Amino acid sequence: MSESLVGVVDHWFGALGVAGVEVTGPAIKVGDTLHFSGNTTDFTQEVGSMQLEHEPVTEAHAGDRIGIKVVDRVRNGDSVFLLVD
């Protein structure tokens, strides 16, 4: 399985467990599997839901700033990769 860089974490909403992600690459869709990676971050999860401007969306494209509910803490500057078969 390969990875493709699709974004970078630009904010951590700790109380909500949400990563703010600036999408920089191919589209991210609900159901995609993402790998969050950084100096102290390393986990993989499926996108269950995401929001753009506080509204639920099923797809985000380069230039969008989205919120994704995550299973672990992320940090500003962490890379977000899309796992590709």
Image (cartoon, grey):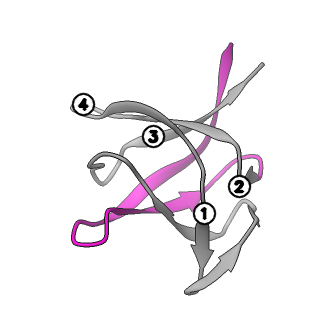
Question: Is residue 14 left or right of 77 when viewed as pictured?
Answer: left
Name above or below for residue 81 compared with residue 58.
above
Label 2, secondary structure: give it. Answer: loop
Q: Main secondary structure of the magenta part?
A: strand
Separation of marks 4 and 3 at Cα, in angstroms: 10 Å
Q: Mark 2 and 3 residues: CB-CB less than 8 Å, in contact?
A: no
Q: Mark 4 and 3 residues: CB-CB less than 8 Å, in contact?
A: no
Q: Which residue is mark 4?
A: 39
Q: Mark 1 and 2 residues: CB-CB less than 8 Å, in contact?
A: yes
The C terminus: image quadrant: top right
Q: Position of residue 36 (x, y in %)?
A: 44, 38
Separation of marks 2 and 3 at Cα, in angstroms: 18 Å
- Earlier-in-chain disc, 4 versus 1: 4
- Where residue 11 sits, quadrant-wise, is bottom left
Separation of marks 1 and 2 at Cα, in angstroms: 6 Å
Q: Amino acid at mark 4?
A: Asn
Q: Residues within 10 Å of mark 1 (few under 14, many from 20)?
A: some
Q: Position of residue 78 (x, y in %)?
A: 37, 43
Q: Which residues are magenta?
A: 1-27
Q: Mark 3 and 1 residues: CB-CB less than 8 Å, in contact?
A: no
Q: Which residue is mark 1?
A: 49
Q: Which residue is mark 2?
A: 30
Q: Amino acid at mark 2?
A: Val
Question: Is residue 80 left or right of 28 when viewed as pictured?
Answer: left
Residue at the (54%, 61%) spot, across then down: 22
**3 or 1: mark nearer the eye:** 1
- Earlier-in-chain disc, 1 versus 2: 2
Q: Residues within 10 Å of mark 4 (few under 14, many from 20)?
A: few
- Earlier-in-chain disc, 2 versus 3: 2
Q: Which residue is mark 3?
A: 79
**2 or 4: mark nearer the eye:** 2
Q: Amino acid at mark 1?
A: Ser
